[in-house]
Image (tube, grey):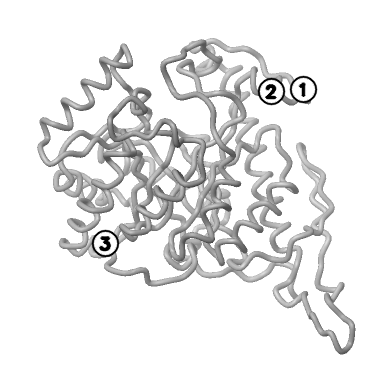
Amino acid sequence: MSASSPLHLAVALDGAGWHPAAWREPSARPHDLFTAAYWADLVTEAERGLLDFVTFEDGLGLQSSDFAEPDDRTDQVRGRLDAVLVAARVAPLTRHIGLVPTVVVTHTEPFHLAKAIATLDYAGTGRAGLRVQVTARRNEADHFGRRAIPRLTAEEWETPAGEELIDGLLDEAADYVEVLRRLWDSWEDDAEIRDVTTGRFIDRDKLHYVDFEGRWFSVKGPSITPRPPQGQPVVTALAHRGVPYRLVGRSADVGYITAHTTGQARAAVAEIREAQAAAGRAQEPVHVFGDLVVFLDDDPGAAEDRKARLDELAGQPYTSDAEIFTGTPDQLADRLLELRTAGLSGFRLRPGVIGHDLERITRRLAPELRRRGAFRDAYEADTLRGLLGLARPANRYAA
């Protein structure tokens, strides 16, 4: 990305915020977390700030402070609404911002998800995406009973057995995305005729069997939902290291990385570009976004104090896979522009406390980046692909 190109900005929405004690802040709305109005308010605020898209977290088990197992804590938010359904509820209330629910592809079926995301794209008139996520938690596998996941300790994740498990889950995810893309293309754009005079609603020759046969899936198709308005909704994925980087390079339109330094970001971008080339996608645009958890106040000391107070409420310092930034919106603008030099084209910001930090992103950070010529001053497209500069792809089955 050139140093003069505008940045892309997204926010990651999760409960009351990414800090586990966020729900106890005065600005939080813990009684509203499971209401449609709460999520509509958040996405409306993000759209007011001209952000590219929002992501919605999801899972197949209750949140846990333990990486691999459920916990018994009662002092943190537990429970979620379904991310795809939340996005669909918010879609008619917004006009421009992209809606990207997290979808766990382990244990679920690509045919079901393909029509759900296609439907979301229709509900949002071309603003749907998804964030692909895998799970290696044994308790989540037990909800479905179709496969056995071994119980691994934190130390065992770094062993050959742990790496083999993760490699398999991510290869499965790549096949899952391939099935999604084929199903979205299984209807040609002009398959619907809708001619009352002749009595022809569809041209059956323009519906296609996808006939996918792989290690994990056997899917015939076609989808029951016509091709989405974007042709292909935007596929995104979070990646921390080599194997997930390969998933981004092979399958995604946007990858999120969790580098803590500019050097780490540069190395991650290089790995993703190598993975793109290995997958034959070197000429395709793939965005790489940096993920940061942010605590923003007008005084940098106030942001640090606020995080410290939340840490005390939580009983331990908050840590994250991503960089944790505490400071002013102006200082965050400096940091983002510094990280951009590593080849990042945008950022997904995780508000520490949504009720406080989201408005600092939309009403302080975005205008500051705009003042520096690094962010849009109006929405320039009506689809998420358009906002990201991604062309609408041709249908692979069209003659």
In the rendered image, residue 165, in percent from the top left (x then y), is placed at 62, 24
Q: Secondary structure at mark 2?
A: helix
Amino acid at dot 1: Gly
Q: Judge the density around disc 2: few (<14), some (14-19), many (≥20) Cα neighbours within 10 Å.
A: some
The residue at 56%/52% (across/down) is: 89
Looking at the picture, tell me which residue is in the foreground, 316 or 385: 316
Residue annotated with mark 2? 141
Q: Quadrant of the N terminus?
A: bottom left
Residue 273 drawn above or below residue 317: below
Amino acid at dot 3: Phe
**Mark 2 in CB contact with mark 3 (< 8 angstroms):** no
Looking at the picture, tell me which residue is in the foreground, 98 or 254: 98
The residue at 77%/75% (across/down) is: 192
Q: Earlier in the sequence, mark 2 or mark 3?
A: 2
In the rendered image, residue 308, in percent from the top left (x then y), is placed at 21, 21
Q: Secondary structure at mark 1?
A: loop
**Mark 1 in CB contact with mark 2 (< 8 angstroms):** yes
Residue 173, picture quadrant = top right
In the rendered image, residue 169, in percent from the top left (x then y), is placed at 63, 31
* Label ID, residue 194: none
Q: Judge the density around disc 1: few (<14), some (14-19), many (≥20) Cα neighbours within 10 Å.
A: few
How far, Cα to Cα, is label 1 from label 3? 47 Å
Residue 328 drawn above or below residue 118: above
How far, Cα to Cα, is label 1 from label 2? 6 Å
Residue annotated with mark 3? 375
Looking at the picture, tell me which residue is in the foreground, 264 or 210: 210
Q: Earlier in the sequence, mark 1 or mark 3?
A: 1
Residue annotated with mark 1? 145
